[in-house]
Amino acid sequence: MDWIVPFILTVITASTPLLLAATGELITEKSGVLNLGVEGMMLIGAIAGFAITASTGSATLGIMAAALAGMATSLVFAFLTLTLMANQVATGLALTIFGVGISALVGSGFVGFAIDPLPALNIPVIRDIPVIGPILFGQDFLVYFSIFMVLASGWFLTRTRAGLILKAVGDSHDSAHAIGYNVIRIRYMATLFGGAMSGLGGAYLSLAYTPMWAENMTAGRGWIALALVVFATWRPGRLLGGAYMFGCISVLQLHAQSAGINVPSQFMSMLPYLATVVVLVIISSDYTKIRLNAPACIGKAFRPAQ
Amino acid sequence: MIRLEPRRQHSQKMVYLSPLLAIFLTLITGGIIFAFMGKDPIEALYTFFIMPINNAYGVGELFVKATPLVIIAVGLAMGFRANVWNIGAEGQLTMGAIFGGGLALAFYDSTSMFLLPGMFILAALGGAMWAAIPAWLRTRFNANEILTSLMLTYVATLILSYLVYGPWRNPEGFSFPESRPFPDAALLPIIYDGTRVHLGAVFALLIVAGGWVLLTKSVVGFQLRVVGQAPQAARHVGFRQKRMVWFTLLLSGGLSGLAGLFEVAGPIGQLQPSISPGYGFTAIIVAFLGRLHPIGILFAGLVMALTYLGGELAQIGLGLPSAVTGLFQGILLFFLLACDVLTKYRVRFGAVNKSGEAA
Amino acid sequence: MKARFMKRTAAALAAVGALALGMGAAQAADPLKVGFVYVGPVGDFGYSYQHDQGRKAVEEKFGDKVKTTFVESVPEGADAERVIRQLAQTGNDLIFTTSFGFMNPTIKVAKQFPNVKFEHATGYKRADNVATYAARFYEGRYVAGVIAGKMTKSNIIGYVGSFPIPEVVRGINSFMRGAWSVNPDVKVKIVWVNSWYDPGKEGDAAKALIDQGADIMVQHTDSPAPLQVAENRGIKGFGQASDMIKFAPKAQMTAIVDHWDKYYIDRVQAVMDGTWKSEDTWDGLKEGMVHMAPFTNMPDDVAALAKETEDKIASGDIKIFAGPIYDQAGELRVKEGEVAPDEMLLGMDWYIKGIDAELPK
């Protein structure tokens, strides 16, 4: 059973970028905004984080730059969809095209650069405790941050006034507006938060997961993050389960291949996607629960009546 | 402070003017970007928008490229109107290609004139079948179709990969991952010599026309419009949401399947691991750019196709990296989407006029 | 018609007043125009990146006498034909299409442009104006195999594969023949990631292999991720396509580098001299199309053996696929005293005996 600990470590790193981006998108969607541009924002975060880390030598600055770059990208989206009321679905997809392009343009100067991976926490002594040592205390900052943000989001949505307002805005912007909340401003903030988290998800790829820059290095993870929000039925706790389940099955199928299982590799590669569908079906069968969680106003433009 | 004021009714003038304004703004912004990159802006814009279509072949390519986008987008638009979010058209396209292409491979030495129609039917069935899964999961288990249709896209791509790397591999192809070439009887006829415009383009126009009739002249179309505009009202007057989910998913799936077949039986001519550069996703943008209306979609599809062709020529003629074309495409889309707002709203500058504006 | 088109374009450029960036220079000497079509972005630091290095070498060598153009990220579908045709139409005299999926489009366009010369990489269809070229990467893999056989302690090699195409299968067979030549106990574990390029997934595959006991990492995918993982986990491995030593200074023992420079320069020269012919070129270590990065992170005796192996392959003293060769089913594929012909290597879809894995069918 020697492989169990490293297996869990692999699952954690594979799941973290998904978890970061999905947490951001969940908050965005809870406010009633559907931003399909996660892939583009992740790429921009990835190159921003990498470029700053490679040029300054400071991963901290890189992480901050990634969050800011993701935020700046989502600001474009927010301006178009919230201020100008452009269609959210189409704008999000256009944002992905834009993000792929601009990240490649900026990144052309950084192809083939090597940087040190993000340092792990590695507290001496505790880290050497078998099994739980490396898993609980041997990770890098962003892994802890991703889990912290999931918990914080859950707390925010259920236990704080601001969270309740955010949900109210997502469920019925007209009523929220009537009570006197500034719907547009709240949605701006939720969208920017989503952008920052997507940027961090991208930075996790380029700084920790595989420390390098290459065009399109997200390889579709933004889409998986989007799917995970639906999978989690807009609950942060389930997001954690979903992201780790997806990561776990992705890695497990690689292990199965390596162990010599005789099934065409294409079928093995399908497993994480199929599992996600199956589990979603099981979760969704209970009608009432989903209905309560899905933001009713998702994707709909809001224009405050004066 | 920018403020938007609703118009009492859609401005007919702006329906036509807003895309022009968007293109004008893109030209200016694009010009500045190109100048910044050391290229002559006028030449760059000429390369992007005019050069791709300044000869018959180029115009033909525009149709070749727009055909799958338009066909898929017409189907998707029906669903989007009814709040059915099929974002797995790419997977349905792949399944259509597998089903229709599979028939061509089963009869690889056939010369029958029934082969091609048979492929059409199978492709539509294949696409519809793949879309039926999200429809069933949504209506039976309440599973969100955004997730299921997207996940099934990955599965469909892997199935195609399995087939062309394995059982359907061309036995005379040195074990490379591609099927046999389709027989002539399974290839779409070219409708204009010297170009690659194939029968699929005619189908695309027919599908646009059919979509228009469906939307404006039929009961279903009426329902679609009502459901989209006032879902609550629709529920009250008894439209069955489930039936709408099935209808729109099967329709968009079937059309996506056809689009996939037109690619493999048209310009590609065989099955291979990659048959679409993401048409199923791009078509979502096309659907919205076309304001979910078949005629609008036709134009949006052509514009979208043009930007791809222009992007290639910008690489060839100007040495611009493909990254710049992506950037430029993104900006064009942003402007188009943003200007669309002008059809519904009037832009006002300055502070809110407290007295006069009460709604 | 082609020439007229060029003139018209040139006139249009002049009329627009192209003062920027060497436009004027291009008109001076009527340079040879060379086009390249890449399947990935030049920023992939893998396959397309290496081809673009070759293009840059052509520019450097010939200066004003050539004008190169490339189109990157061209999907292997309906779009390829148009891109290739546009390159031919805009006056390119020689066009390199660098991925297998461009084979049929290249042949189609070549028929319409008999005066333009085409070169298609890794395919098998030729025409009077279409040549093919490919590199014998498997020769480098044999050298890597020898090193791995000497260096492994667990006797388990981890192999990250992209897709089970003949090129990759050939590489695995060659690698294992190299490994077994020095260490008959070596076993290989293979994981297919179904992608040429997904750094995250490639890295995860490498981790899975290491967790199952592999202590040498080999990859036939394009990103440095598997090697980075090897570096992190303290094992050794090999770079792919380009020298990846920067990404794994302690782990990379050598890399199998694609070197298209010389071939591209030779072919451009041939067109200039009027000696270009449609040929099938399949070059390896001897001609320098495949090149081993410096042997590092290994004892001197292993490095010496590796160097010797490399030289012997180049000189022909080592024939990698010399008989007798049995496949997994025990069938004799290459008889004693014979060497597998190139056609057999080209379409290789079977593992040699001793490899403990099933090839996906």
Image: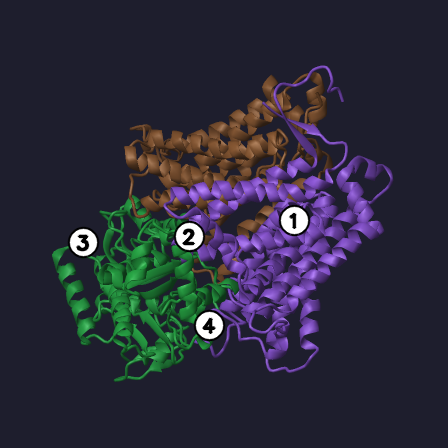
CA distance separating discs 4 and 2: 31 Å
Residue designated by label 2:
C16
Q: How packed is label 3: few (under 14 Cα within 10 Å), some, or many (20 or more)?
A: some
Instruction: State the SS at label 2.
Output: helix
Looking at the rendered image, the disc whose residue lies closer to the viewer, 4 or 3, is: 4
The one nearer the camera, A300 or B54, is: B54
Q: How packed is label 2: few (under 14 Cα within 10 Å), some, or many (20 or more)?
A: few
CA distance separating discs 2 and 3: 55 Å
Residue located farthest toward the right when viewing the structure as drawn: B237
Q: Are marks 1 and 3 on the same chain?
A: no
Residue designated by label 4:
C109
Q: Label 1: chain?
A: B
Q: Amino acid at mark 1?
A: Ala
At which x and y percent is residue C244?
Answer: 27, 52
CA distance separating discs 1 and 3: 56 Å
The numbered mark at residue B287 is 1
The numbered mark at residue C296 is 3
Q: Are marks 4 and 3 on the same chain?
A: yes
Seen at 24% across and 58% down, the residue is C60
Q: Amino acid at mark 2?
A: Val
The one nearer the camera, C9 or A177, is: C9
Q: Amino acid at mark 3?
A: Thr
Q: Earlier in the sequence, mark 2 or mark 3?
A: 2
**Chain B drawn colour:** purple
Q: Label 3: chain?
A: C
Seen at 73% across and 41% down, the residue is B12
Q: Is residue A57 above or below residue C345?
A: above
